[in-house]
Image (cartoon, grey):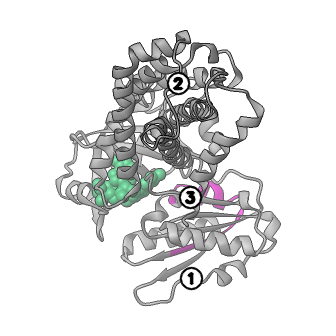
Amino acid sequence: MNRNLLFCFGVVFVALLLPVSIFNIGEATPEWSLFWQVRTYFVTYSGMVSMILMSLCIILSVKHWPVVRWPIEKWLGGLDQQYRLHKYLGISAAFSALFHWASFLSDDFAMDLGFVTLKDETFPFWTLVEALGDPAQLIGEYGFYFTAAFVLIAWIKKFKHNVFQFSHKLFPYLYLLLVLHMVMFFDASLWLTFPGLVLLMTSTLATVGSLLTILGFNGKQKRYPAKVERFTPMNNGVEVVLKVDPQNSREFQFKPGQFAFIGFGDKERAHPFSLASACHRDGTVRLLIKANGDYTNALINSLKVGQAAQVEGPYGCFNFDDEAKQHIWFAAGIGIAPFLTAIEAVGKNKTVSLYYSFREKESALLAELKQRAIEAGVDLHVRDTTSQSRFASEEIISNVQDINQCSVWFCGPSELGKRLERDFAKAKLPSKAFHRELFEFR
Ligand SMILES: Cc1cc2nc3c(=O)[nH]c(=O)nc-3n(C[C@H](O)[C@H](O)[C@H](O)COP(=O)(O)OP(=O)(O)OC[C@H]3O[C@@H](n4cnc5c(N)ncnc54)[C@H](O)[C@@H]3O)c2cc1C
């Protein structure tokens, strides 16, 4: 089974079953039969687990947490990694919601099969649940269906990116409805238990996060107006130079390897692109954009000098900042973009070997790369994979002077990155010394 899927099952399994022995949660009315006691436990606890996971998922989707945002991003290794964890939490939350729903329905099956009889619901909490039952249950039921649908849309890459984004836009509203479902059904006496407090804290933060997103504040603090200063068509792409509004250009500072969400004044949601030039005080920002799909294809043909744009960022921790003496950089295709900012800044201070493989030959870019590599003393290896063989991992590893004093920075197709990471792990590179920029958030 897929490793990520196993991870998600694992999270749900541990979250659901481990606390049984640690926390005595959801004590059912003792005179009920064992079936009702177990069912009550699972319905309550799986509901709590799925809300905690869903809340964490929402918390991580917020780019703009005024005080703590940077430490969270830094701790997780960048916004791309933060979004990956957000994805796994979303999938795990859907699994536990499925468990919650199945536990809830288990009494119908058990009664239909004649295994159990109705429980005595004179206990005040259960009387209240009966009274609120229908609307709260309906919200929960449809909330579950929509959550499952959104997770499938995010998961199955066959759905177009704009369908994925639309479903993500709806999710904060859905989350608020699920909070309502939780408040209506949750046994008030449980709020002051340890898991109840965790649920309270995470769902409060996620409610604030959902409101920030709905009101359009998610990332707003880091948005700067800009204009297209010039652009040059490239082989299957375009090089764009933006100029951030002079009033904001001092504020907009970034480090080598970081990226930003760029909007071009159209209806499309901003897309992430690496900042492919060093940070200039005059606010110019260079982007290398490859025609990767519908939007980028259309953009290349519609760009105009002077066109309004918007830069939101910088984000990311692919910033070459470590103590390693030797750096191995590997770029494939448009993955060269984050390295272009780093050549001078990092290349002059460390021993750097840059491996660049490409299929769409861009002579101007290659000439620039070669020139800058010579100036910075970077050992550059280039390979055109339409006519030459790919770089083999062994070839790269054989150039490493001391595996314990080295770090690897990769940007390119994810399968290639995974293979390189595996091969470096076999060569005993510590796992934290391998850095991979994820060019996809899904
Ligand atoms: C951190 C990061 C840095 C990147 N840097 C560069 C770069 O320097 N140059 C470059 O050419 N490309 C870069 N990309 C990839 C670029 O964002 C996508 O190629 C582009 O958004 C494709 O959009 P599309 O609608 O044309 O293609 P689609 O066919 O719609 O999408 C192709 C793939 O691009 C991704 N994508 C699409 N829209 C978005 C969006 N709004 N937000 C996030 N991902 C999206 C999805 O994974 C999708 O599967 C980067 C991506 C990330 C995550």
Q: Mark 2, residues whose alpha carbon is within 10 Å: few (<14), some, or many (≥20)?
A: few
Question: Which residue, given by chain and number where applicable, does mark 2 sit on?
Answer: 119
**Residue 410: x percent and y percent?**
58, 64
Which residue is depicted at the point 32% across and 34% down? 170
Magenta span of residues: 340-356
Distance between the Cα atoms at labels 3 and 1?
A: 28 Å
Distance between the Cα atoms at labels 2 and 1?
A: 67 Å
**The disc label shown at residue 391, or none:** 1
* Left or right relative to 301: residue 16: right
Q: Nearer the viewer, residue 233 or 74?
A: 74
Question: What's the amino acid at mark 1?
Answer: Phe
Question: What's the amino acid at mark 3?
Answer: Asn
Question: What's the amino acid at mark 2?
Answer: Lys
Distance between the Cα atoms at labels 3 and 2?
A: 40 Å
| 106 drawn magenta | no
Question: Which residue, given by chain and number where applicable, does mark 3 sit on?
Answer: 4
The picture quadrant where one finds residue 74 is top right
**The disc label shown at residue 262, or none:** none
Badge 3 element? helix
Query: Are the two marked residues, 2 and 1, in contact with CB atoms closer than 8 angstroms?
Result: no
Q: Nearer the viewer, residue 314 or 86?
A: 86
Q: Which comes before the other along the chain, label 3 or label 2?
A: 3
Residue at the far top: name it.
124
The picture quadrant where one finds residue 243 is top left
- Can you tell me which quadrant of the image ligand 1 is in? bottom left
**Residue 367: x percent and y percent?**
44, 73
Q: In the rendered view of the protein, which quadrant contains the N terminus? A: bottom right
